[in-house]
Amino acid sequence: MGKRSSFPRRKADDYATPLKGVMPVIPHLRAEGIVTFVEPCAGAGNLVAHLCRFGFLCAFARDLRDGFDALTCDPNIFQGADAIVTNPPWTRTVLHPMIERFSDILPTWLLFDADWAHTKQAAPYIDYCSTIVSVGRLKWVPGTKHSGKDSASWYRFDRRHSGGPRFIGQPRFRQITLAEIAEEEEAAC
């Protein structure tokens, strides 16, 4: 997965989102007051499971693999959620239309390659990208020895925003540990 990989890409860029990739966005979702989210590129549901472990509620999760097309669906199915949060396909012919469509509907957090923000192809979208949260390299294929060769970032898009993004590097966000998750779950009971 990525531009420097010799491995063939999986169909529909179907890579499970690792927990390490979700941790950096949690404080930003909380700070924004997000409680409910939709996941229109859910794959096997890893991202949904991770977010639910942190107390977020999934209002809707579907995927192309079960016949759901996020680019042509009725946008009303996203109503009632606070945000769209997804690890979309990184293929630009799919990613760019998703950025446009999703950011028209709800504030949208997308996990994809960090280099994108530094390319000419980002120019039409970067003005309404409000936040970029650095994630770093992730291990996309469980059981493999090495992480991917490309760094990832969370991008927040919202058509109501203008002026470009604020960049949050890795040292600036506070990691949330699994122990903290357990403490929060225990306190909620």
Image (cartoon, rainbow, N blue to C red):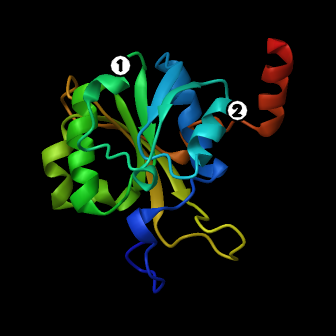
Residue at point 42% right, 64% down?
A: 13
Q: Is residue 181 left or right of residue 132?
A: right
The answer to which of 60 and 144 lies nearer the viewer is 60
Residue at point 36% right, 60% down?
A: 90
Where is mark 2, residue-wise? 53
Q: Is residue 103 left or right of residue 58?
A: left
Q: Which residue is most to the bottom? A: 6
Label 2 SS: helix
Relative image position of residue 5 (x, y in whole percent): 45, 81
Relative image position of residue 4 (x, y in whole percent): 41, 80
Amino acid found under the numbered disc labelled 2: Arg
Residue at point 22% right, 51% down?
A: 96
Considering only vertical position in the picture, is 58 above or below 1? above
Task: Decide which of tag 1 and tag 2 comes sooner along the chain.
Answer: 2
Residue at point 72% right, 72% down?
A: 143
Q: Are marks 1 and 2 in contact (CB under 8 Å)?
A: no
Label 1 SS: loop
* Figure quadrant of residue 172: top right
Q: CA distance from mark 1 to mark 2?
A: 23 Å
- Quarter of the figure with the C terminus: top right
Q: Residues within 10 Å of mark 2 (few under 14, many from 20)?
A: some
Relative image position of residue 32 (x, y in whole percent): 46, 19
Where is mark 1, residue-wise? 79
Q: Which residue is most to the front? A: 67
Q: Which numbered tag is attached to residue 144?
A: none
Amino acid found under the numbered disc labelled 1: Gln
Considering only vertical position in the picture, is 28 above or below 186? below
The answer to which of 173 and 187 lies nearer the viewer is 187
Considering only vertical position in the picture, is 165 above or below 2? above
* Figure quadrant of residue 105: top left
Q: Which residue is most to the left? A: 124
